Amino acid sequence: MISVDNSAEKRVFHLTKYEKKADFIQLKNEIIKNIEDKNYFNLAKLIKRKYSSQFSLFVFYKKIQKEIKKIRNVRVRKKLRKLNWYKILIGNITEIRQIISSNKSLLFEREHFKDIFKDLYEKNLSNVNAPFKKPFFELFEDLNVCPYCNRNFVNPIYKENSVGADNKNQSPDIEHFFPKSIYPFLSLSISNLLPSCAFCNKIKSDVDTFQNNCLSPYEIKNSDFRFDFTLKSERVKEVKLISKKGCKNSEILHLESLYNDVHSKYINDIFKDVLKYPRTYKDSLKKEFKLTESDYKELFRNYHDEKDFNKQPLSKMTKDLYNQIKNLTK
C-alpha cells in the first residue's frame, strides 16, 4: 500500500463551470480554511453563498438532509439528523474513525437508511453520468496506481469518441475504505473514498476494515508496510509483506501471494541486473545512497522517493528490494 494525500485541499471537489470566477475561488479558499481549522459548523453559513451549488460538499449535504426527512422510523431519523454531516462529508480519516466509534448504535439500524445512501452515491458519484464523478477523479490527478496494491494503473480515460457499444469514458472503481454496506452514512465521505483497481475493490469486498484494524492509504506511513525478500542462489525465492503489528491489510487484499505469483520474474530481473555489475553498484551501495535519480531509474526501473510511489506500479516493492540489497552488501 502507498500513502495518499488527505489534506484539506484534497477533500474539496466541485464542478468546473465557474472555477475561474473570483467569487468561486474565494468561496473555495474559505471552505478549505474552515476545514483546516476544523470549523465545520461555519460551513453552514457558506452554503448560502453564490456558487455553493457547484461544490460536492453542499450538494451532498442538501440531498442527505432531504432524504433523512423521508425516513419513517422516528428514532433513526432523529439520530441521523443529529450527526455533524459537514464533518462526515469532509472530515479527515481520523475524524471519520471517531465518527464510527461514536455512532455504533446506528449500525444496528442501517436497514432503515442504507438504500437512501446507496442511491445518493450512485446518482452523484458512481454512475457513468454522475455529475461529480469526473471532479472526484480530478482530485487524484497525481495518483496513477492503485493505492492498495501499487500494481495496477487507475487513470480515468476520457475519449473523444466511443467505438461501437464501448463507453466514451472509462474510470477506475471508487472504493469505500470502510464498506458502505456496513457504514452507509459514510457513502459520500471524501475521506472514505479512493480510486482503486477493480481487482482490489472486488477482493476487499465488504470486509469490515474498521473491526479488522486496517489502515487507510490516507493514514499509512511508508514504514507501516515493508517487503522482505528471501534470497537464495542469487535469486529472489520468496516475497513477504511485513505489516505494522495488528494490521490486516495484506491478509485481506492477499497482497503477499499476488506479488509472489505475478511479479517474481520482474523482481528477479532487477536482482540479476544488480548482480551483473558488482564492482560498480556494490561499491556504491556499500556507502550512503549516492546514486542519481537517473541511475536509480535505470537500474531499478522505478522511482526512488516515497512521494513518487503513486506514479508507477511496484515502486514501493522496488525501493524495499533496493534497501535489502544495499544492506546485504555492507
Image: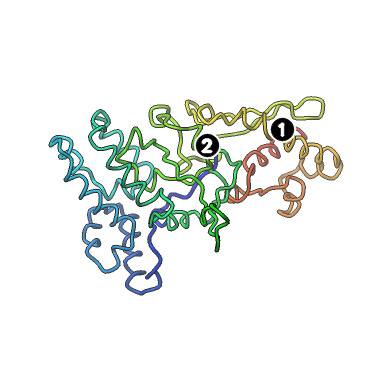
Q: Residue furthest left?
A: 74
Give residue 73's position: percent from left, percent from top.
Answer: 15, 35
Q: Amino acid at mark 1?
A: Ser
Whole-angstrom CA distance, mark 2 to mark 1, is 19 Å
Q: Quadrant of residue 276?
A: top right
Q: Quadrant of residue 250?
A: top right
Q: Quadrant of the N terminus?
A: top right
The colour scheme used to paint the residues is rainbow
Give residue 22's position: percent from left, percent from top.
Answer: 35, 74
Do the residues bearing badges 2 and 1 touch, measured as CB atoms within 8 Å? no
Category of crowding for the residue at label 2, using alpha-carbon neighbours closer than 10 angstroms: few (below 14), some (14–19), many (at least 20): many
Q: Quadrant of residue 129?
A: bottom left
Give residue 122's position: percent from left, percent from top.
Answer: 36, 47
Q: SS class of the residue under badge 2? A: helix
Category of crowding for the residue at label 1, using alpha-carbon neighbours closer than 10 angstroms: few (below 14), some (14–19), many (at least 20): some
Q: Which residue is mark 2?
A: 200
Q: Is residue 315 visible?
A: yes
Q: Which residue is mark 1?
A: 264
Relative horizontal placement of residue 322, taking residue 76 as reference (left or right): right
Closer to viewer: mark 2 or mark 1? 2
Task: Please determine whether, in this image, residue 108 is positioned above or below residue 157.
Answer: above
Residue at (42% x, 31% y) in the render: 206
Give residue 69's position: percent from left, percent from top.
Answer: 16, 46
Relative horizontal placement of residue 222, taking residue 30 as reference (left or right): right
Mark found first going from the N terminus, 2 or 1: 2
Q: Quadrant of the C terminus?
A: top right
Residue at (55% x, 44% y) in the render: 146
Residue at (36% x, 37% y) in the render: 180
